[in-house]
Amino acid sequence: MVCKVKHPLVRVEWLDAYNQASWVDDGKPSEDLTVTFGLLVTRSDAWVQLAASHVPGPGRGYWGGMWNIPAGMVKRIQTIQSKPVCEVKKKPRRTGAA
């Protein structure tokens, strides 16, 4: 069975907030970017929404593993596949003959 995914697979680089709960030698925050991969659900001036899974259904279907990233924190979005296709191969049926 082949399923066509209507949302691009993307790589998002973004600056995340973090907390240092122990003693540190300087108070300088890191500018290292967080990298998240997923299906691009929506993108607006306020948010970038990614999902790890999608099940088609009524309306927009059902989403699993949602990430809601503030758009102002996003530094780069790279499309990995614009129209990903997944293929699920069925296992061969066993016959009753031994």
Image (cartoon, rainbow, N blue to C red):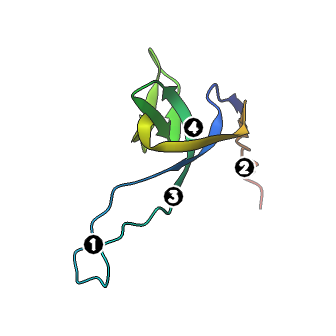
Task: Tell me the amino acid under the disc marked 2.
Answer: Lys
Q: Is residue 45 above or below residue 12?
A: above
Task: Tell me the amino acid under the disc marked 1.
Answer: Gln
State the residue at coordinates (65%, 29%). Answer: 5
CA gap between label 4 and label 1 equals 31 Å
- Location of mark 4 (residue): 39
CA gap between label 2 and label 1 equals 49 Å
Q: Residues within 10 Å of mark 3 (few under 14, many from 20)?
A: some
State the residue at coordinates (41%, 31%). Answer: 47
Please tell me which residue lies in front, 64 or 15.
15
- SS for dot 1: loop
- SS for dot 2: loop
Q: Are marks 2 and 1 in contact (CB under 8 Å)?
A: no
- Location of mark 3 (residue): 33
Task: Tell me the amino acid under the disc marked 3.
Answer: Leu
- Location of mark 2 (residue): 91
In the rendered structure, which disc, 1 or 3, sits on the residue that comes first in sequence? 1
Q: Quadrant of the C terminus?
A: bottom right
- Label 4 or label 1, whichever lies nearer to me, is 1
Residue 1 seen in the figure = no
Please tell me which residue lies in front, 73 or 28.
28
In the rendered structure, which disc, 2 or 1, sits on the residue that comes first in sequence? 1
In the rendered structure, which disc, 3 or 4, sits on the residue that comes first in sequence? 3
Residue 64, given in percent of the width and then of the height, sits at: 43, 40
- SS for dot 4: strand
The disc placed on residue 20 is: 1
